[in-house]
Amino acid sequence: AQTVTQSQPEMSVQEAETVTLSCTYDTSENNYYLFWYKQPPSRQMILVIRQEAYKQQNATENRFSVNFQKAAKSFSLKISDSQLGDTAMYFCAFMKHGSQAGTALIFGKGTTLSVSS
Amino acid sequence: GAVVSQHPSWVICKSGTSVKIECRSLDFQATTMFWYRQFPKQSLMLMATSNEGSKATYEQGVEKDKFLINHASLTLSTLTVTSAHPEDSSFYICSARRRDSGFFGPGTRLTVL
């Protein structure tokens, strides 16, 4: 079974600064996907970034980037130039690769990020 | 991305009644949808996998007779909470997979009095 661990329950950062959220996972699979989702106070789950395990290059989406270390099973999220709108709960998630439409996302416990001015 | 809708967004019901929550994929077909439950400030816990045209698969510890799932078409899955009790009060979220990413409905807040 797969597990996802987020060891930082809460983080805080000042506007315009950079913050890194940690995530580790455990799996025996070789091909899989990793995700970071954002859940603001509205509670709508928003996909922030996706990484395919077979790609060595780290994914980036504007101010969001990841540091994917496959051997260490580590997948951290870096948010640059933090904005007040980044305040949310962030979830790291794992999903098996392939055409298995029946494969669900497995989530970590989440990190609550607060951005202050 | 992909759009997933959920209805209703908020429901209050009396103990012992049943409540139906709908989840629709608006711009794609989803042979499989997922139902999650989330308590305040906690993570999403997978309840069941909804398969179009066949029986749902429930996670360990989830009562299939209490949480009835029907996936009648490629764009609609429903979750019915039967004989609801206050301990069933929670936030329920559906999800569908498209192009190897998961997309979520906005969630349904259920309060059972």
Image: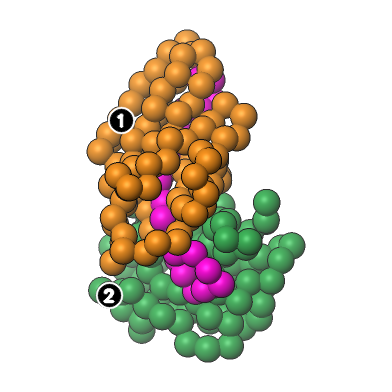
Chain colours: A orange, B green
- B56 up-or-down from A29: above or below: below
Q: Please say whether residue B113 is visible from this viewpoint.
A: no
> How many labels sit on residues?
2
Residue at the image point whose x is 68% and y is 51% from the top: B1
Visible residue check, residue A3: yes
Disc 1: which residue: A10
Kind of residue indicated by mark 1 = Glu
Measured as percent of width and height from the top left, residue A30 is found at 40, 62
Q: Which of A87 and A95 is in front in this view?
A: A95
| Residue assigned mark 2 | B60
Find numbered disc 2 in the image and state the secondary structure of the residue it sits on: loop
| x 41%, y 51%: residue | A93
Residue that extends furthest to the top in the rendered view of this protein = A117
Q: What percent of the width, then of the height, locates residue A50?
A: 53, 47
Chain label for disc 1:
A
- Residue A10 included in the magenta stretch of the image: no
Asked whether B109 or B57 is in front, the reply is B57
Dot label at residue A38? none
Q: How crowded is mark 2: few (under 14 residues within 10 Å), some or many (20 or more)?
A: few
Assign a secondary structure to mark 1: strand
User: Which residue range is magenta in the image?
Assistant: A82-104
Q: Which amino acid does label 2 sit on?
A: Gln
Which of the 4 quarters of the picture holds residue B86? Answer: bottom left
Question: x and y percent of residue A104 in the render?
Answer: 45, 66
Q: Which residue sits at x=28%, y=55%?
A: A26
Left or right placement of residue A3 versus residue B110 in this view: left
Residue found at x 53% / y 80%: B51
